[in-house]
Image (cartoon, rainbow, N blue to C red):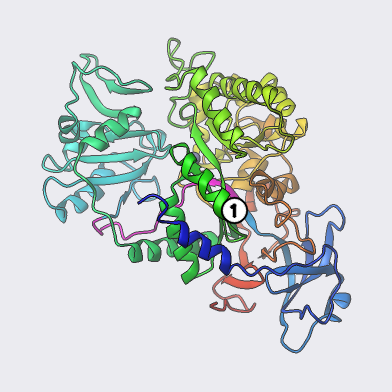
Amino acid sequence: MRGWYRPVLSSLIAAAVVAVVPAHAGNTNEQPVTLLVIADDLITLDPALPSAEALVACGEEIIAVGTADAMRRLIGPDTLVIEAPGRVVVPGFNDAHLHPTPLYDEMSPWGTIDCSPAAAATIDRVVERLRQKAAITPAGQWVRGSGYQDTKLGRHPTRADLDRVSTEHPVLIGHSSGHVAACNSLALALARIDADSDDPKGGRFDRDAAGVPTGVLRESAVGIVTSAGPERPAPETATWIEAIHKRFDEYLAAGITSIQHAGTSLRTVARYRRALAARRQVRISAMLREGEIDELERLISDHGRGDDWLQLGGIKAFHGNSLSGQTCWLSQPYADRPDYFGIPPSRSRESLVRLVGRIHDAGLQACIHANGDREIAMVLDAYGEVLARSPRPDHRHRIEHASVCPDELVARIKELGVVLAPHSYVWEHGDKMEAYGAWRWDFMHPNGSALAAGIVIAGNSDSPVSAAVPLLRIQSMVTRRSAEGKVYGAAQRIGVLDALRAWTIGSAYASHQDHRKGTLTPGKLADFVVLAHDPRTTPADSLRTIGVELTVVGGHVVYRKEGSTLPAPIDR
Ligand SMILES: [Zn+2]
């Protein structure tokens, strides 16, 4: 099987047709204008020309930005003209860290039951939804759910709750953090977990007063239980592609034109290539799992990194645990448990330095997940050690999340030239910050202190951890207010333009693609969004309600809001 994907990727690269246009070029006869967009304002985010009335594109790229009159003079008989009075245009949003999941029917054999608060507000409702799936699932097969929030349900569901779903099916539901799960007694039995079982390295089985596992699994304990159960049915590739297209349609409707998949495989990359061949929706940058580094290195040396639609990015690795799952490793205890500091990372300092060195020496970008201050400090130590022995000015190594990040760590991040992809999920998960104590809130999710220090931040949803809805995420960064109305860490609020920059040029920088996207600039890709209202004049607590009216990727309309009078999407 080794190398099987090579023809797939090389044909992708061969098929790439990218017009080469000098920056700030005007129009010439060789560049027929295919698209003109005129709006009240184009928030270009390009310091050379921050505001404009119009832009024109030739094929995939923007070729000029300026006044409506000047741009009109460039069009030809075949130019698609989009006039959007009263609206504003911003660069397309780029979600710098997310985990795209195909959108399957819940009741299909590979479907997972949605246990998020919107679908199931109480434990009884979670149980009832899972029971419906159990009723159509052969005994012995998994019944799986995802997205439950302990803070919204009042507690984690336990084996006793999930035994009410079934005692003939193993049942397991994932927490919204992706780092914690709850399972029933049969799932524990299949994994031979009981009161005598030790906690695994890097994980924990929650236990009752008598030491009996409750069914709540943390970090590496989740994998022990899932891998002991039956194999899950997997759909055909065609079904997968259809379901990923549905997910990508959701992204387009939210104004997302580029995504960065945090931690994927070359097998999935090959599937993305097929999904793109069938329908070009969003641009994809893939951060591969650390286990794929050898293959990735070979692939890049043979075929390069891909193109504007599908790029092989860096290596995503974990060093540490979860903020919203309350497993990240802290230097001071959790607020509600004076003897609990979280779960230490399973990797030693030495092996972390080896891993970072391996990634760095391959010329790749390291994207390391760390949340707790003790985890972040270890990652910075590793970056520092590797960069000291072999400096590389434009490495752009990243820390994913960096959630509990006091000023002294921010200063080291700046010094090392590290890029941050912090959470922007106070709206959904502000309540998870209660466990960290109010004294920490002003240095959690450090968007504000990172910007003040001159660190590049990349906007991201970590979807499905929080919704892949950039305007909601931007609201969360600007207000730090939860859905319940409480502000967590006002000191880390940032301005709306800074939040827009994080979600566009910041994310593009974080994947080494800022020369191609992130601002509305001649020579860059014509990826942009038409918004119904100007985010700069919209009240901060209403930013999420600004409608995305039109999404354009590579000069093509790919989404139009229902009821809009702007031009409709065209298949290509
Ligand atoms: Zn993630």
Q: Residue 255: x and y, percent?
A: 60, 60
Q: Residue 370: x and y, percent?
A: 53, 29
Residue at left offset 41%, top offset 33%: 151
Relative to 360, residue 97 above or below: below
Give 225 or 543, whichever is nearer the viewer: 225
Residue at left offset 78%, top offset 58%: 44
In the rendered structure, which segment of residues is drawn in magenta? 95-109
Q: Residues within 10 Å of mark 1 (few under 14, many from 20)?
A: some
Secondary structure of residue under mark 1: loop
Give 179 or 134, whichever is nearer the viewer: 179
Q: For the C terminus, give its image quadrant.
A: bottom right
Which residue, as the protein is rendered here, is positioned at the far front? 302
Relative to 208, residue 523 above or below: below
Which quarter of the figure has residue 168? top left
Relative to 140, residue 195 above or below: above
Question: Which residue in the protein does label 1 denote?
Answer: 304
